[in-house]
Image: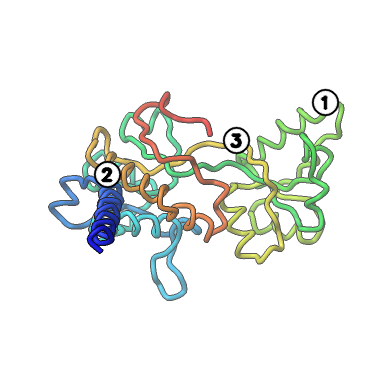
Amino acid sequence: MNAYLRMAGLALAISTMAWGAASQAAEVAKSTDVKQSGTLAVANTLDYAPFEYLDADGKQTGIIIELAGAVAKLVDAKLDVQRTPFPSMIPGLAAGRFKIAWETFSATPERLKQVDFVMFLKAGLAVSTSPDKKASFSGDTPLCGKRIGVSAGSASDFLVDKLSEECTDKGQAAIEKSVFNSSTDIVQAVLSDRVDARMDDATASSYFEVTSKGQLVVLPTLYDVAPLGMAIAKDDKETADMMVGALAELFKNGTYKAILDRYGMGAYAIKEPYFVGTMDALRAE
């Protein structure tokens, strides 16, 4: 009996130690600002679905809002989303009006003169087509000979020209490009078979695939892939460390992937969050 009790006690001790280790692993160092205020304040536009928007009931929702809420729980703080126009975000950080602007920023040399970034996502350009045509987009050059719709003056507009040249250089048919003034017009062109597919921002394409209930499907290839991140006030190491640490925990416990998958964005997950203070810190993944 005594031996049994000793074994039970040992099992309980090991279980308690494991729980304590798990709890310790989940702890995230708070910035001084969050400690003093009890609030995680985040500047956000609240007008770019699926990342942030107001639902039919006026409730804040979207990928970034859910991630920010999960971070706030980890640091035991109340989330305060401060609606801010996008052009005002980096100047606002530089002026000290807030410490975090959580949007999908790409890092540029100009921006890095004023702010740092914590990368949490990747994106690029993607091609969407109707389900019945998906199988026809195959091989190493799936767009050659296809009719592709793009928005005038967009990154897709220029990329299709480049890809078309690559097709002809390889002795294949050129891409037949059609230029439209809005994404809605391109979608209708695909659905009415005036073009075979559309090329657009990958994240928006995936979101439309979900909300359209499969009228269009996104092809697996991503073009011009680049990391995206939130902006942090320059040299604010405390805040940057807090956000990297909190996101790392969300990556580890599955929350990050679950949120992305819920919005059809699982393809744009990165391996781990990371800090970028200079251009050479950017990772290709």
Residue 49 vertical position relative to residue 236 in the rendered view, above or below: below
Find residue 170 and name its label: 1
Residue at coordinates 71% horizontally, 37% vertically from top-left? 160
Dot placed on the residue nearer the N-terminal end, 1 or 3:
1
Residue 40 seen in this snapshot: no
**Residue 49: x and y, percent?**
50, 59
Q: Residue 45: which quarter of the image?
A: bottom left
Q: Nearer the viewer, mark 3 or mark 2?
A: 2
Task: Specify the amino acid type for callout 1.
Answer: Lys
User: What SS does tag 1 mark?
Assistant: loop
Residue 190 left/right relative to 220: right
Real-space Cα separation, disc 2 to disc 1, in angstroms? 49 Å
- Pointer 3 residue: 224
**Residue 188: x and y, percent?**
72, 60
Colour theme? rainbow
Dot placed on the residue nearer the N-terminal end, 2 or 1:
1
Task: Specify the amino acid type for callout 3.
Answer: Asp
Task: Specify the amino acid type for callout 2.
Answer: Met
- Pointer 2 residue: 242
Front in this rendered view, residue 2 or 281: 2
Dot placed on the residue nearer the N-terminal end, 3 or 2:
3
Residue at coordinates 39% horizontally, 55% vertically from top-left? 67
Residue 41 vertical position relative to residue 279 in the rendered view, above or below: below
Real-space Cα separation, disc 3 to disc 2, in angstroms? 30 Å
**Disc 2, disc 1: CB below 8 Å?**
no
